[in-house]
Image (cartoon, helix red, strand yellow):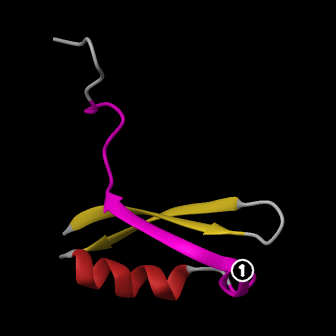
Amino acid sequence: MADYRVTVRYGERYQRYHTFEVEAPDVARALEAAAELIPDDVLPQADLVELRPAVDPGERGYLGEE
């Protein structure tokens, strides 16, 4: 199982973001899981969904680090 970070952009006049994580064996299953977790009040205004592997902040590399 892998962890995926999901970001949903929503809002009419001002854009907002709802971010959460799902655990799934692959991207297709992660999308299915994410669809079930988007809050009802966000759904009507959502216009973009991004899914990417979740990275542990402690393991994340930064530019300039050796």
Q: Magenta part of the protein: which range? A: 40-60
Q: Is residue 42 above or below residue 66?
A: below
Residue ranking furthest to the front:
13
Left or right of 28, for residue 6: right
Mark 1 falls on what kind of element?
A: helix
Q: Is residue 48 magenta?
A: yes
Q: Is residue 16 above or below residue 45?
A: above
Q: Position of residue 60 (x, y in %)?
A: 28, 32
Q: Position of residue 63 (x, y in %)?
A: 28, 19
Task: Please count the marks in the image.
Answer: 1
Residue linked to disc 1: 45
Left or right of 55, for residue 17: right
Given the image, on which type of amino acid does mark 1 rest? Gln
Left or right of 53, for residue 33: right
Q: Nearer the viewer, residue 25 or 16?
A: 16
Q: Nearer the viewer, residue 54 or 64?
A: 64
- Quadrant where the N terminus sits is bottom left
Left or right of 25, for residue 35: right
Q: Nearer the viewer, residue 55 or 52?
A: 52
Residue at (71%, 60%) from the top-left corner? 16
Q: Is residue 14 above or below residue 60?
A: below
Q: Image quadrant of residue 19? A: bottom right
Q: Is residue 46 magenta?
A: yes
Q: Image quadrant of residue 18? A: bottom right
Q: Image quadrant of residue 2? A: bottom left
- Quadrant where the C terminus sits is top left
How packed is label 1: few (under 14 Cα within 10 Å), some, or many (20 or more)?
some
